[in-house]
Image (cartoon, rainbow, N blue to C red):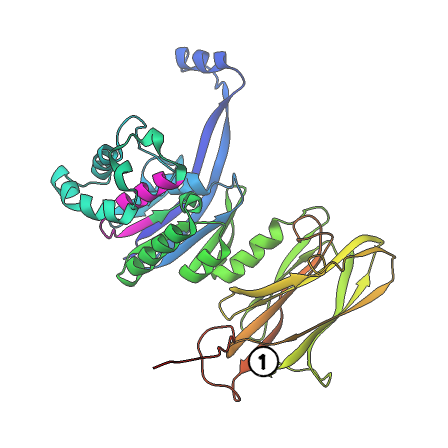
Amino acid sequence: MPAIVVSNLGKAYKRYTNRWSRLVEWLLPFSRPRHQQNWILHDVSFTIAAGEAFGIIGTNGAGKSTLLKMISGTTHPSTGTITVNGRIAALLELGMGFHPDFSGRQNVYMAGQLLGYSVEDITLLMPEVEAFAEIGEYIDQPIRFYSSGMQMRLAFSIATAQRPDILIVDEALSVGDAYFQHKCFDRIREFREQGTTLLIVSHDKMAIQSICDRAILLNAGKIALEGKPEVVMDYYNALIADHENQHVRQEALTTGKVQTISGSGECKIIDLKLVNAAGQNTDIIHVGQSVSIRATIACEQDIESLVFGYMIKDRVGQSVYGTNTHHLQKTLHDLKKGEQVAFDFQFDANLGAGTYSLAVALHASDTHIGKNYEWRDHAIVFSVINTKHDQFLGVAWLPPKVEIQQ
């Protein structure tokens, strides 16, 4: 049985031209409508299996938080249906449900009862909540004295005091310090191993790709793409770039991966290869081997500023290393139409054994978001093997010098 089924979901709010229109419509209910429908979500459908980790991605205003509120039951849909099987624990807006004049302990009792716990249950769980939140004596201070990070600590501790059937987490975790974020994600992973269904909204690419099985991209209130987290995140990164004259497309590769290509096309990559020290093309390299990324760029228009960058990703799409000519203080300026430029990046592949991909980008400044000429994910796929060094784990080769005194 699916944990969550969303069918043809829509949410609209009434928008009035002025404050009197609302009053007239209320006093004269059978007269013509005095409002317009402002649709936040329209025709959204998806199914989440029990025990699945599902990510929701989108720009601000895409409807992510509204969708979560409807799934958790704090807001009702205008159209469509939502079916939920299991007990939900939701961490939505930071401090949602907290009273600023009540102490943290009092708010734990209030928020816990909203989650369906009895007073006796909360009393038994209180030591665990205090221990996980790690806010010390502040637990008996009014919430108004809390920082945003302390509020997040307490809210997450309450929501996860017991393992729920479904855990919904919005961007609230982003305000926490690095230590507590790691602690939260450890608990989320633990819940997932125990069978909890996860629904996560985040702009954190690493969080989405490391935890989620599937993801959707919301754009202007509709589902723009559904699929593997890496594919959806690549498409999202292309969409948030400068939209002027930009095209975005996805192509299936023979490896089974999906390549996202975007950009205005003002300059293009006409040749790209990974070569060994002898200058030969290669897709299999040894740990620590010296290799080069070589690219030839052709300008289709006059270009004021050109930056070339690359990113090495592991097999699940996590970023391993990336840089560009802006960060290396080698930005090119005033290129003419028809001009070609060759780039050569030489480095030692201090990578762990496994499969990797290379993403490349042409843009005008430090990132592709300002002006994107061309972005290619999975531009090159290569493998790293280890036949010469001691065995090790991970994606980075960092051989230590060991001294032992007995």
- Percent position of residue 144, x then y: 35, 29
Residue found at the very far left of the displayed protein:
120
**Which kind of residue does numbered mark 1 sit on?**
Gly
Q: Eyeballing the image, is 146 above or below 196?
A: above
292 versus 317 height, above or below: below
Q: Nearest the camera: 389 or 402? A: 402
State the residue at coordinates (45%, 84%): 391
Q: Percent position (x, y) of residue 199?
A: 37, 51
Residue 253 or residue 315, whichever sits in front: 315
Verify whether residue 158 appears in magenta.
yes
- Using residue 7 as the reference point, say whether residue 103 is left or right of it: left
User: Which residues, given as a range, are shown in magenta?
Assistant: 149-167
Q: Is residue 358 above or below residue 24?
A: below
Residue bearing the label numbered 1 = 288
Instruction: Left or right? Give the position of 136 relative to 238.
Output: left
Element carrying mark 1: loop
